[in-house]
Amino acid sequence: MTALLRALPIPSGQRVLDLLPTLRDVLDGTGPAVLPVPADDPRETERLASALRPGEPIDDEIAVVVATSGTTGVPKGAQLSAAALRASGSATHSFLGGPGGWLLALPAHHIAGLQVLLRSVLAGTEPVVLDVSGGFDPADLVPGIERMTGPRRYTSLVPTQLVKALDDPAATAALADLDAVLLGGAATPVPLRERAEAAGITIVRTYGMSETCGGCVYNGIPLDGVRVRIAEDGRVLLGGTVLATSYRGLPDHPAFAQPGWFRTDDAGAVQDGVLSVLGRLDEAISTGGLTVVPQVVEAVLTTHPGVRECAIVGLPDARLGERVVAAVVPTGTPPTLDELRKHVTDQLDPTAAPRELQLLDALPLRGPGKVDRVALRAALAAHDGN
């Protein structure tokens, strides 16, 4: 009988625990291939179903198809085998010091949240679940972490959640009681990591994507079974036991053109076996004939005391081609453009200094805590035109 992909509605809150038997079959490779979709969001479910076609045939080796949270309008589906998911979970626990209990504080239809459930199944534990359908409330961390059992306890967050938690002393203390807080989904600013570590929180920076079963490089070190190399153009390539087989319906996609390797959109460097991700190649800004990588500028801006969160985008400019624009969520007294320009030029080439500053209450997000640069660029361009 031909295997068919089945949509798996993922509910919010405690109801997600009802899916643990299904996810056990996923890890065993004994159940049907599933496409996680958000049960409480019919529009997103329809968008994913339209692109990834549940009900149609799929290769027998595929256990899960996870939609990517890319910047394009049409989602791609990373096809993950049960063996890859088991390898990812086992390698994670090995890096962290052993299996343990998990706290779910992320939407579970994305790979980061789904992996919290799968790692729990692999460890033989039941996760503690926070309902984040109405947004993340750091106060919920305190009773949630109190309900967790050992011998080891972990959670996975995105940087925007950690920012909120660090503003809540009780939530900060609760996170400090955990054996590890995995932080991924977006780049972690150095000041945020240092602030968390100063509060006693054990931060593990993760790098990966749906195509690699989520995080596969921890604190710059590839997990067991994971391979990393840098292409001639500076692009990060990832391979190994955690790799997706392909995208659903796109067997010849260039990202998987090299057998055994996934071609990311990230620039990076490896020194002494440690990977540093420099930023996304497809988000680079061409200004005055020179290239500016947004994440490099953001890493500098977040060290300014007046910057809580920030994002750098390029907007069309008649003279420069693109001009560098900083969107900043301030902390305390908002910084001025001149202050931020000086702060950047003290550490980087003057070309990287923002030529425009927009103050925001919050940055637009997509997927698991990533800045929605398309929406941000559109909003800033609309503001610029007024």
Image (spheres, helix red, strand yellow):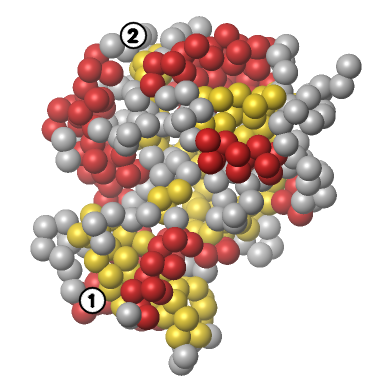
Q: Nearer the viewer, residue 242 or 309?
A: 309
Q: Secondary structure at mark 2?
A: loop
The answer to whether residue 242 of the structure is visible from this angle is no
Marks 1 and 2 close (CB-CB < 8 Å): no
Q: Which residue is rendered at x = 50% and y = 20% of the image?
A: 117
Residue 244 falls in image quadrant: top right
Q: Is residue 65 left or right of residue 163?
A: right
Q: Is residue 28 left or right of residue 363?
A: right
* Residue of label 2: 149
Q: Nearer the viewer, residue 15 or 340?
A: 15
Which amino acid, by three-letter code, is at mark 1?
Leu
Residue 133, position in %: x, y? 37, 32
Q: Which residue is rendered at x = 24% and y = 66% of the image?
A: 359
Q: Is residue 79 above or below residue 24?
A: below
Give the residue furthest to the bottom. Answer: 319
Residue 334, position in %: x, y? 15, 65
Q: Is residue 107 above or below residue 323?
A: above
Q: Which residue is rendered at x = 26% and y = 25% of the image?
A: 141
Mark sitting earlier along the chain (1/2): 2
Q: Is residue 248 left or right of residue 66?
A: right
Estimate how packed mark 2 is, as few (under 14), some (14 to 19) or many (20 or more) residues with alpha carbons within 10 Å. some
Which amino acid, by three-letter code, is at mark 2?
Thr
Residue 163, position in %: x, y? 26, 43
* Residue of label 1: 337
C-alpha separation, residue under disc 1 versus residue under disc 2: 48 Å
Residue 63, position in %: x, y? 70, 23
